Image (cartoon, rainbow, N blue to C red):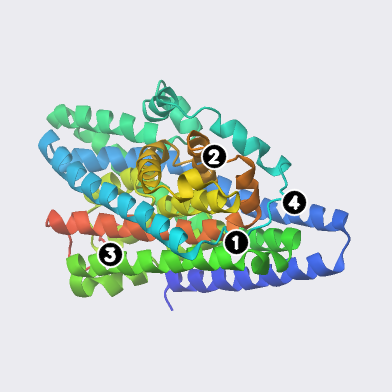
Amino acid sequence: MSSANKLTLYIFIAMIVGVLAGYLVHENYPAATIKSFADNVKLLTTIFLRLVQMIIAPIVFCTLVVGIAKLGDLKTVGRVGGKAMLWFISASLISLALGLVLVTFFKPGVGVDVSNVDKTAIADLVDKSKGFSLAKFVEHVVPKSVVEAMATNEILQLVVFSIFFGIALTALGKRGETIIHAFDTLGHVMLKMVGYVMFMAPLGVFGAMASAIAKNGLGILSTFGMYVGEFYIGLLLLWLLMLLVGYFILKNRLPHLLRRIASPMAIAFNTASSEAVYPKLVEEMERFGCKDKIVSFVLPLGYSFNLDGSMMYMTFASMFIAQAYGITSITGDVWQQVVMLLVFLVTSKGIAGVPRASLVVVLATGEMFGIPKDGVALILAIDVFCDMGRTMTNVLGNSLATAAVSKWEGELEHTGHQHPHH
């Protein structure tokens, strides 16, 4: 059994044990004990996520700079970037539209009881979403200090800086080679660290599950079962669509790709954090046979622009709230829905690093369309279960995008074996 498969297995065991532990605590202990258990066991997840976040910025920076330097010139950077963006925008639009169609078809929000909504829970989300404006968007994209962007894990700002840096480095020609080589080595040091950090993944997963179930019990699953179930049906359709396109491009290499990304997808599902798997994903995509220069250019871009699962969730959640509150101006007006779609396409682009990002966007964008803030509190408790699915979908989408761009560039090796330098 390969180490990657072992990790996947341990993660699933940890998930089941976490659910059991959470259930036992929820059923047998008073509220105060449950709260302290949930808070303390969640520390395992916090430790794991922080360890991963600690290596995200250096990995994105090193790999992206080296990637651009290896692509060689502005023309290639533009061509690869163009292909990637074409994929990202099409995928985002399809995901948004699919969410809209499904939620209109299923109508999960109709008849939901909105009387006892817990409004305190969304206070901090509301703060984050205060007045989402063009100015805010620009601030999210353009860094004023690369150190600050690194410190706050603003992936999009880091991508902007790295692109400039990489292009400048390439322009130096011979003189830049020592730096490129140094960054390349640094990137490998970081990937080595990933291996160590991933030992913590099962513990992080256990903490996340135990905490969620201890707090809410298994009952929460049945209460919102329809909503979660219908959202997952949507994800399934989205998967089928993506895999179909993937098969069209990769042909018989597709199963191999899926085997490679099984363990990153399991971690993404259980921790509900795309960041948690970024470093591991870089490694697995290279092992699959994508050239490092493409991987390190397309993946970080995808993390900012290509969150298919989250996109679908945004339209799904907004329409669910609109249905629950009976806001006919949206549920009954197709044009309003199309406008909302396009607004989501833009507003979702600057918030890759924000946890619960989709909810923040739903809050910020919803206000423009008269969707009540309190509605988000309706779905807050089960958001974690939807978040797991959408994060896993984001990972699949980005892996497919990277493989597709590699294929189009003629840079997909057929060996898919370990690189000699690993």
The amino acid at mark 4 is Asp
Alpha carbon distance from label 1 to label 2? 28 Å
Alpha carbon distance from label 1 to label 4? 14 Å
Instruction: Kindly identify the residue that appears in the image at 12 percent across and 41 percent down.
Output: 76
* Vertical comparison of 145 with 416: above or below: above
Residue at the spot of label 1: 205
Residue 371 in view, yes or no: yes
Label pair 1/3, CB-CB below 8 angstroms: no
Mark toward the start of the polypeptide (3 vs 4): 4
111 or 414, nearer to the observer: 111
In the rendered view of the protein, which quadrant contains the N terminus? bottom left
Element carrying mark 2? helix
278 or 321, nearer to the observer: 321
Element carrying mark 3? helix
Residue at the spot of label 2: 363
Alpha carbon distance from label 4 to label 2? 26 Å
Judged by depth in the image, the label closer to the viewer, 1 or 3, is 1
Looking at this view, name the residue that lies furthest to the bottom: 1
Mark toward the start of the polypeptide (1 vs 4): 4
Instruction: Kindly identify the residue that appears in the image at 48 percent across and 38 percent down.
Output: 369
Residue at the spot of label 3: 288
Residue 275 in view, yes or no: no
